[in-house]
Every structure is written in structure tokens, then in C-alpha cells.
């Protein structure tokens, strides 16, 4: 499969070439022909720009996706376009997306993810606190009955539900310490148990 370049400068150069061709056609054709060609060129340009704008979804590697390769006791994540590593774990049987965060002490669920996993944030007691870059945030300690990460199963995993705003759940060190080896190299995160 041919991969389009990630550098937007290439698309700007293409746009400049198209505009140059448009101006050169002005001398070759009359004004009516120029209007026809301008309309055709504009529609083509819109199609190219729309394809470029949607290219991340077409490639299936949008900002919140990492490729995952798993084999016996080993999981490899490829770095997503935003520079983070993402993984989907089954929490109490429900798929929850996490960003792998070695700077986070614990597993932290968003309120939405907690609901998906069968935990009702409205009934939780937010009596603990986490320090974030934006200051302290209330949290509620919970126990996740089951955690399945690409066939690696754990039970009764301690976690926290975030009482504030958070876009993605965090897979922190309290879970990552279950692995014997964590290695980051050349855009890959390797977890070995």
C-alpha cells in the first residue's frame, strides 16, 4: 500500500503547482474556457484537500490509536501520531481505552470509563486526591474485578475514578509494575510478563 507523506509542505507545493497551472491556462484559453477549467480544478483541489483531511482515519492510525501486537506474555504497542501509546483493556468485560502513562502512579478511570466498567460515579465516595499539572483532583478508590490486557488476565486490581475532567483513562505504574520488563525503543513500547 502506498503511504502518503506526512509532511504538509508537500501538499502546499502541489497546491502552488495547481495554481501556477491555472494562471498559465489563462493565456492558452479564452475567459469562458478559463472559468470551466477553474471550476474543474477547484473541484479536484477540494477532493484532494478532503482526502488529506481524512487521511488519518482512512489509514486507521488516528491520534488515539496504537497498533497492538501480542504473543505469549508479551505486548508491543506502536507509538500513535500524537506521541503517546494507547491500549484497550477489558475492564470488568468492557473495552476501555487507556493512555500508557509511566508518570501516573495508579490506574485512573474517567467517569465515562467507570460507567462502562459497571461502576457508577454517582455512588462513589471521592475522598482521596490526586495531584495533577492543574492542581489537586478528587478521586475515588475502586477495585476492578477483572482486567484483561491482550489475554493477560488480572483480578482485583486497585484503581481510582477521577472526579474531575479527563479525556482518557490512564494506565499507570501500579498496573505496569506487573510486567517484568518495560522497554521503549524506536517508536515501540514493549511490555513483557
Image (spheres, rainbow, N blue to C red):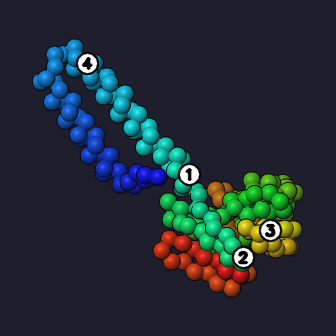
Q: Which residue is mark 4?
A: 35
Q: Residue beneath label 1, please?
A: 60
Q: CA distance from mark 4 to mark 2?
A: 63 Å
Residues marked 1 and 3 touching at CB (< 8 Å): no
Residue at the front extreme? 1
On the image, the x and y values in percent for residue 160 come to 77, 68
Q: Could you tell me how far apart the alpha carbons at marks 2 and 3 are, in whole angstroms? A: 17 Å
Please, is residue 85 above or below residue 42 in the view? below
Q: Earlier in the sequence, mark 2 or mark 3?
A: 2
Residue lying furthest bottom in this view? Answer: 180
Q: Name which residue lies at 49% across and 43% down.
A: 54
Q: Which of marks 4 and 1 precedes in the sequence? A: 4
Quadrant of the image containing the C terminus? bottom right
* Farthest residue, direction top: 32
First in residue order: circle 4 vs circle 2: 4
Within 10 angstroms of label 2, few (less than 14), some, or many (20 or more) residues? few
Distance from Cα at disc 4 to Cα at disc 3: 62 Å
Residue 89: percent from the left, percent from the top? 73, 64
Q: Which residue is mark 2?
A: 72
Amino acid at each position: 500500500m502506498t503511504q502518503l507523506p506526512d509532511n504538509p509542505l508537500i501538499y502546499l507545493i502541489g497546491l502552488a503547482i495547481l495554481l501556477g497551472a491555472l494562471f498559465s491556462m489563462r493565456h492558452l484559453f479564452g475567459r469562458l474556457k478559463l472559468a470551466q477549467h477553474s471550476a474543474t480544478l477547484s473541484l479536484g483541489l477540494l477532493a484532494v484537500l478532503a482526502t488529506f483531511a481524512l487521511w488519518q482515519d482512512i489509514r486507521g492510525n488516528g491520534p488515539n490509536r496504537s497498533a497492538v501486537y501480542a504473543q505469549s506474555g508479551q505486548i508491543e504497542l506502536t507509538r500513535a501520531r500524537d506521541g503517546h501509546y494507547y491500549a484497550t483493556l477489558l475492564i470488568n468485560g468492557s473495552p476501555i481505552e487507556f493512555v500508557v502513562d509511566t508518570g501516573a502512579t495508579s490506574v485512573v478511570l474517567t467517569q465515562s470509563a467507570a460507567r462502562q466498567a459497571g461502576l457508577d460515579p454517582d455512588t462513589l465516595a471521592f475522598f482521596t486526591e490526586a495531584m495533577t499539572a492543574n492542581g489537586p483532583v478528587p478521586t475515588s478508590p475502586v477495585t476492578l474485578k477483572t482486567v484483561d490486557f491482550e489475554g493477560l488476565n488480572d483480578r482485583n486490581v486497585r484503581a481510582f475514578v477521577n472526579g474531575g475532567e479527563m479525556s482518557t483513562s490512564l494506565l499507570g505504574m501500579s498496573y505496569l509494575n506487573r510486567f517484568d520488563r518495560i522497554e521503549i525503543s524506536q517508536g515501540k513500547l514493549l511490555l513483557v510478563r
